[in-house]
Image (cartoon, grey):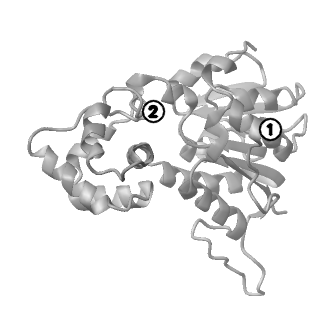
Amino acid sequence: MTDKINTYHIPVLRDACIEGLDIKPSGVYVDVTFGGGGHSRAIFEKLSSEGFLYVLDQDADAKANVWEASNFSFIQSNFSFLSNQMKAKGVMEVDGIIADLGVSSHQFDQPERGFSIRNEADLDMRMNASSQSTAADVLNAYDEEQLARIFRSYGEIKNARRLAGEIVQHRTGGSIQTTKELIDLLSGMAPKFKEHKYFAQVFQALRIEVNKELEALESFLTQAADLLKPGGRLVVISYHSLEDRIVKNFMKKGNVQGELEKDFYGNPLKPLTEVTRKPVVPGELEQKENTRSRSAKLRIAEKNG
């Protein structure tokens, strides 16, 4: 294996993730957000030749970080297709699954991808470059009601309706195509002294909509629970409250709504049991060395028998 990790992505909470997976040397594991391969390498080092690691990533750039091994396989795919991808490989159950959600440092650091407020670029924000809709498409095609919904729901923006109205009004004089054009428009809308946070919230909302991130997460969690063997582990790192709420509800209650269902005898109908009742968060040193980790929350659950 070649070590490209330092230039691509520093794995967040790596040791806690590996401990949470409780790796069996001969087990089968899936990293559904391969990225720079940091978590995958740590998993692979724990496996014997009888173990196997499958990795998924929808971003074609991640292919640059794969390595050759008979018990390693890279699949270019969104994790919302986890079940079908595993069935295609003849895999019906696995011992552990890990997901490190959100945008990778590599994607943020590529100006042309349009994820960052720091760089001027086209408003793209697609994690899979072959997908059709971009952030510019959303901004220029959605009506006021649709824009207000995504800003409110995905960015938790207080003046979502007013912002949506400003964007629609601005479009009468021309479309919004670049990050700079959007930030210039947002500058008049942002709360004083909180401009940076406001810009980030708007970019987050657009990114989530473009990539259908929350829908994909909900689908993935259900598939992951089905795919795990009894006693298998699910490890998920989230970076904002919307993701964490979905993960927490599913692990705790068995569904993303957070409503515990019971069978006729009053037994809880949920596939997982929480291993960590509270999320694991990075320590001060990790937060200092890897600023991306500051908002990370790690949750771990085990498949019920």
Q: Secondary structure at mark 1?
A: strand
Mark in front: 2 vs 1: 2
Give the percent coordinates (x, y) of residue 152.
38, 60
Would residue 123 be seen by someone viewing this image from the given angle?
A: yes
The residues tagged by marks 2 and 1 sit, at their Cα atoms, a distance apart of 26 Å
Look at 30% across and 38% down and name the residue there.
Answer: 183
Give the percent coordinates (x, y) of residue 164.
25, 55
Label number found at residue 139? none
Pick whichever, 9 or 258, lies toward us: 9
Q: How many marks?
A: 2
Q: Is residue 219 left or right of residue 289?
A: left
Look at 36% across and 51% down and name the residue there.
Answer: 192
- Sequence-wise first label, 2 or 1: 1
Q: Amino acid at mark 2?
A: Asn
Give the percent coordinates (x, y) of residue 102.
55, 42
Residue tagged by mark 2? 128
Give the percent coordinates (x, y) of residue 242.
54, 57
Q: Is residue 18 left or right of residue 216?
A: right
Residue tagged by mark 1? 28
Q: Amino acid at mark 1?
A: Val
Q: On screen, 247 above or below 63? A: below
Q: On screen, 186 above or below 180? A: below
Location of residue 226 (image quadrant): bottom right
Q: Classify 10 Å Cα crowding around label 2: few (below 14), some (14-19), many (20 and above).
A: some
Location of the N terminus (image quadrant): top right
